[in-house]
Amino acid sequence: MRHLVLTAPAMAAVTAVAGCGGSSSSVASGGSSKPVPLVVYSAQGYDSAMVEAFQKATGIPTKLIDDSTGPLLARVQAERANPQWGVLWVDGDEAFATLDRQGMLVRQFQPQVNYTAAGKAVVPADGSYVPTGLTVTAAVVYDQSRTPKPPASWQELLSPTWRGAVGMNDPSVSGPTYPFVAGLFAGLGGAAQGEGFFSALKGNGLHVFKTNADSLHALQTGQIRVALIQSSAGIAAGLKAPQIKTTYLPKVTSLPSVIGISAKAPEKVQQEAKRFASFVLSAEGQRVMLSGDASGDSLYWPIVSGVSPPAGLGSLDSVPTQAIDPYRWGPQESAINSWFTNAIVH
């Protein structure tokens, strides 16, 4: 069971944006003119429910293209000269920082909501994308029946205790995994230190899988004892199998779900896209996010003040998080992923 609790000020703030409002631009629906279709590219588990609710609330015809993060980002780049999307909604702000530097995103727009401190930490200075919620990467997920005591630090994973016992996803395949890798690089002091850590982890028998499902299967069948994956995936696994637990090492990287608006979309589409982003952060939109994928992506920490996370997540304040600079690490994604493929996967 998941709960949404809004304080009176927060309710007023988020309700106000359901049908309007950006801090820098009007998001009027364009008067009495006929709405044009809004195309949403999304990798979120609750996106279908959100698109349906938005269309019902606004009357704006909305088409959802749902796929994994990697294929969607590749599609956006392939359409760079002639974008077919109005909204892009995936996890991780590094990709959006890259799109922003390429001039592909509308800037100077944020819905008029009261962000939490964690939310403010992932709002870009130029308003080029909109964070909508937070998970963290990578959480330590383990089977308590096989592993009563999980590791207490990243360095501990390099010890003989965990030889051949650790698994993670391939950042070239799994969208949320690159921010984990970049976050460790940042936390350890830079690329050289990060490469050294992952090389040592490989030397200690690291297993690399394609997706969360693969890593979790390896954990549940005893192939590994620890899976380093996105927090929502680990918590969801624990809902189905209570012996699966999730914990966090200092520090884990904040992984925002993010909306970007195409700078090359027609003005009418951009206005509709701003209404969509505002709706997502409204009271109604937050209810949809928190219920639309109850055993998956809905297991996130809200970043709108007064909105409570699903029962069982606890306070984000208890999680040792860091927010890395997406404008530093986003442009390095291709190079770091290539290094990881060549040096760690192979």
Image (cartoon, helix red, strand yellow):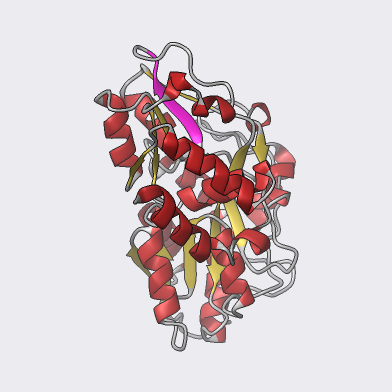
Looking at this view, name the residue that lies furthest to the left: 221
Q: Is residue 299 visible?
A: no
Q: Residue at x 68, y 56 (%)?
A: 325
Which of 177 and 117 lies nearest the eye of the viewer?
177
Q: Residue at x 57, y 21 (%)?
A: 152
Magenta stretch, main secondary structure, is: strand
- Residue 143 in the magenta stretch? The answer is yes
Residue 275 in picture, x, y percent from top left: 57, 67
Residue 115 in the figure: left or right of residue 146: right
Q: Is residue 285 above or below residue 5?
A: below
Residue 116 in the figure: left or right of residue 256: right
Residue 290 in picture, x, y percent from top left: 48, 41
Looking at the figure, which quarter contains the N terminus? Answer: top left
- Residue 2 in the magenta stretch? The answer is no
Q: Residue at x 46, y 47 (%)?
A: 288
Which of 186 and 319 lies nearest the eye of the viewer?
186
The image quadrant of residue 63 is bottom left
Q: Is residue 111 above or below residue 11?
A: below
Residue 133 in picture, x, y percent from top left: 57, 47
Which of 334 and 27 lies nearest the eye of the viewer?
334
The image quadrant of residue 79 is bottom left
Circle count = 0
Residue segment shown in magenta? 139-144
Q: Is residue 248 visible?
A: yes
Residue 39 in picture, x, y percent from top left: 41, 73
The image quadrant of residue 155 is top right
